[in-house]
Image (cartoon, grey):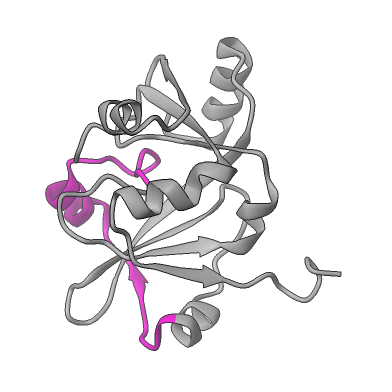
Amino acid sequence: MINLADTFKSAGIYFELYDHRAIYTNEDAVIIKEEQGFVGTETKSLFLKNKKDDHFIFFTFTTKSTDFKKIKQLVGQRLSVVKPEEMEALTGQKPGAVSPFGYEEKVPMIIDAELLLQEKLVFAPGRPDQTMVVLVKDLSKIVELLSIETYDYPLSKSEDN
């Protein structure tokens, strides 16, 4: 993992970084968010793979279920969630603290289009004892800076009315 704080700082990308006790559940995240006072939309990053062991990140809301049929249509192949032990061995990250970006290897990112309607995004930058907040308007700069291939996970019919 690259150091996102250093990378964003040198690129002039606004971020907030909070140190706190480790978070592994949504319940803990709510408590820490209240204690630390940060503001933004809670996100999750699912670490996925295809049959060839190519990896992908699905960046979405913590509370949203994943439509794997929609993901298959989007990327043209079936993806599944990487087992926690395998993910930890590959990335050094624990479940519940997966970063949406910052990988040494190229990991395409599937971005939930509904996230783009928010103002700030809250995520773990690869460590369960840190939380990072970025502005949605800077997401395209981050993607460009880190040379991330992206896919737009479309709004569902009930969300775009």
Mark count? 0
Q: Which residue is at 62% across, 57% downward? A: 64
Picture residue at 58% right of the left edge, 31% below the top: 27
- Residue at 26% over, 26% down: 6
Seen as rendered, the residue at the extreme top is 35
Please report the bounds of the magenta region as a residue range. Answer: 75-100
Q: Is residue 60 left or right of residue 80?
A: right
Give 106 or 82, whichever is nearer the viewer.
106
Residue 144 x, y percent position in the rendering: 36, 54
- Is 109 on the left or on the right of 86, as rendered? right
| Position of 77 relative to 9 (above/below) | below
The C terminus appears in which quarter of the rendering? Answer: bottom right
Pick the front one: 127 or 101: 101
Give the position of the N terminus as an image quadrant. top left
Residue at point 61%, 63% (across, down): 113
Residue 19, horizontal then vertical, whole percent? 39, 15
Q: Does residue 153 belong to the magenta stretch?
A: no
Q: Residue furthest right?
A: 161
| Vertical order, 93 against 86 (above or below) | above
Q: Quadrant of residue 58?
A: bottom left
Q: Percent from the top left, x then y, of residue 12?
A: 39, 29
In magenta stretch: residue 80: yes
